[in-house]
Amino acid sequence: MKIALVVVNEDGLIVLVNRVFLDFIRLKEEAVISQPIIDILENSRLHIVARTGIPELNDIQFVGGKPYVVSNMPIVREGHIIGAVGKISFRRVEELRDLAQKLETMDSRLTHFQEELKKARFRERPFRFEDIITINQAMQDIIQEAMQAAQGLSTVLISGESGVGKELVAQAIHQASPRSDAPFVKVNCAAIPENLLESEFFGYEQGAFTGAQPGGKQGLLDLANEGTLFLDEIGDMPLSLQGKLLRVLQDQTFERVGGTETIRVDIRFVAVTNKNLEQKVREGTFRQDLYFRLNVIPVHLPPLRERLEDILPLVHAFLRKYNAIFGMQVSDIAPGALAAFRSYTWPGNVRELENVVERAMNFTNENIIKVEHLPPHLRSIRSDQGFQANRKETEDKDVEHTVPAYRWKRDELERETILKALHHTGGNKSEAARYLGISRSWLHEKIKRFGLQ
């Protein structure tokens, strides 16, 4: 491998060159010595390094339309920058192409993860399986299966209604996998316009279409290489793209828009949907072969109305979250409000429950959420015990005293919830208290009251 060398002084004027450099620029030594480097070598940054003292290593620099690997380093004497030396490496075209592609991938990934960082400013760390709050046995079994599936490479298809936490489970699968240190890249198949989805997904080559960036652009498949690609709302992917996705799933290869080179990737796919894909297959709006290829490991998350016992621990978890955000100290929910929660069908599932808790905390000036703090559609709900959830705390208390059946039912619910939490944590009271979002002393009082010691 040949190396061209050029040295400039602190003013960016050439003071020394080697024969390889002269052959490269096709000039004689007397024509370049004492000349500004910027006049001799196009796109050079050597004069900038001589001024700032900041080295630039292994950059791709185009000279005459061809790429070269260039390193510029300052020359320092007795603490002062007196110039800089530039080194141009002549590598094989294949090496340059690979290096340029790696640098482009790093730049694209940096941009992607800077955007993700903005979205995650309140999230202390990535979502993990241990962050999933449930004491429902069916849900616990599902999570256990997902944890086991995370260790493999097979595609996972997560289904369930909107708001049940499909994306969080997808994140947890990635974090529990051997790829946890690699990228987790999300593509929303419903949010990106159809005419842009293909180029966003596969990337494109220079001149692929009007308005394309000079030099082309890498796609989400490039960003997700060696990591996990999260296909959100896969049921809304247009048919025109489904066949190309099938090929990536089968062969782990693709071509960019406007390109002919076959690119190989190593990606683990996790797809989610709130649609009935089998029905869409019958309707002809979703490819059957793609459905079978996605549905290797199916994970179906049940709606909140089928696991009502999770409402109380979820409420306490959201209280902790928004206490930290709002600087509040709301610690509990009144019996009437809890009864309204348990009597509601929650079409928006856990996401809707979180929104209701957040709203209630905006309307309370105390350390408890009452019926009067709930939205109108929840304030008017009648519980299974036949009482109307009212706006006043005193009426909540009257209900508890005048309707013994309700108080008994509430106690049974609390007892069942505590038992399940203790079973889930193997009898560890500290862990059970943390899981339920309550203090250990409060848990001990309940255990004593219900005779669970």
Image (tube, grey):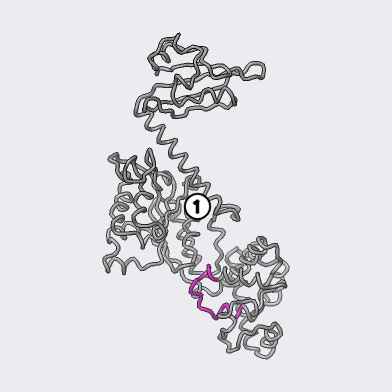
Q: Is residue 317 visible?
A: yes
Horizontal relation, residue 90 to residue 330: left or right: left
> Compared with residue 117, is residue 404 higher up or lower down, i.e. above or below?
below
Residue behind mark 1: 176
- Does residue 343 show up magenta in the picture? yes
Tag count in the figure? 1
Viewer-side residue, 86 vs 357: 86
Q: Residue at x 41, y 48 (%)?
A: 220
> Compared with residue 56, is residue 190 higher up or lower down, i.e. above or below?
below
Q: Residue at x 32, y 44 (%)?
A: 256
Q: Which residues are magenta?
A: 338-352
> How many other residues sit within 10 Å of disc 1, few (<14), some (14-19) or many (≥20)?
some
* Badge 1 amino acid: Ala
Q: Which SS type dominates the magenta stretch?
A: helix
> Where, by quadrant of the figure, is residue 425 drawn?
bottom right
Viewer-side residue, 363 vs 161: 363
Horizontal relation, residue 151 to residue 310: left or right: left
- Does residue 315 show up magenta in the picture? no
Q: Residue 170 in the image: x percent, y percent?
A: 46, 57
Viewer-side residue, 52 vs 236: 52
